Amino acid sequence: MSGAAMEAGRTLAMGQDEAVGGGRGSVEAPFGRALARLGQTRPEIVGLTADLGKYTDIHPFRDAFPERFFNVGMAEQNLVAVAAGLARTGKVPFATTYGVFATRRAFDFVAIALAHSNLDVKIVAGLPGLTTGYGGTHQAIEDLALMRMIPGLTIIDPCDATEIEAATEAIAEHKGPVYMRLLRGAVPVVFEPGYRFQIGKARRLREGNDVGIIATGLMTERALDAADALRKQGISAGVLHVPTIKPFDAEAVAEFAAAVRHVVTAENHVVVGGLASLVVETLFDGGIAKTVTRIGLPDRYIECGAVPTLQAKYGLTTQAIVTTIKDLG
């Protein structure tokens, strides 16, 4: 896919600074577009899906390289097993399905067929957290907690279209199994083109000393907007973006947390076992005494409904972050 074609699918507004955009455009299917570009120079890359090619944005790769694309049907355990077999022949498989199916249904296969043998398979998982209104059967609200327990598995939760593209390139270069959450369809642009993504590294996006917001995935966009709103109200809020859940950048988190009065975590995931738990573990291990306020999903299955309504109800909004921080006093 040419650079011109890539830009044809991108709509950008002027940014506030070099790294973070102020206006928000979007990119259609950034993962599939990035994978199709990689496929032009990486003949060993193959694509797989469990009957969800259109709905996991791998269709640009499928259309560009039909002979390197395999649909195994609605059989997620088989998806992982086939990907493992292809990896053993020297291929680099990118396997897509929904996060609930990759984790709940195929957990043992990911652990044993992939991670135990350190195979070079990339699982790209759609509908992370509360990004679908189809209820508990389709909402991967606990996937980070599950997958971080698997030894040797790299876990990525990108913020926006720019980071999805950069992370796709990075995990293609990385040797070993990867689980990456996928924002699909028209994905917002938060970071400007040229944003650098590095596996295992957090990135400080806003400076502040009253409160420090540690965020991952789509919640980073909301954390940035909240920080801007709070600054207008006289509250200095820093933002640390943590796109890699494993390996976790504990050093950056500890340094960031030590420099603020309050720590707030924000994640599109249950507040147990994911980012919040990692932050608390990091602070405890480092002997850093801070109160941590957790923004995320409660320990329950989420009902069906419109996604904006559900996100507002369960506090995954910019306003919820602002209100939570103001209530800290």
Image (tube, grey):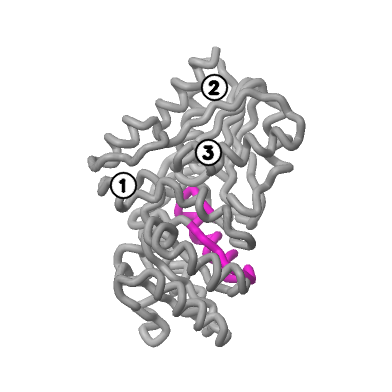
First-in-chain label (1 vs 2): 1
Q: Which residues are magenta?
A: 156-180
Disc number at residue 136? 1
Residue at 23%, 40% (x, y): give it: 305
Q: Gap in Å between the C-alphas at discs 3 and 1? A: 38 Å
Residue under numbered circle 2 = 231
Q: From what the image shows, is residue 252 above or below residue 235? A: below
* Residue 256, position as x, y percentages in the image: 69, 34
Amino acid carrying label 2: it is Arg
| Residue 170 counted in the magenta span | yes
Q: Is residue 148 left or right of residue 260?
A: left
Residue under numbered circle 3 = 16
Foreground: disc 2 or disc 3: 2
* Residue 293, position as x, y percentages in the image: 54, 26
Q: Is residue 118 left or right of residue 301?
A: right
Amino acid carrying label 3: it is Gln
First-in-chain label (3 vs 1): 3
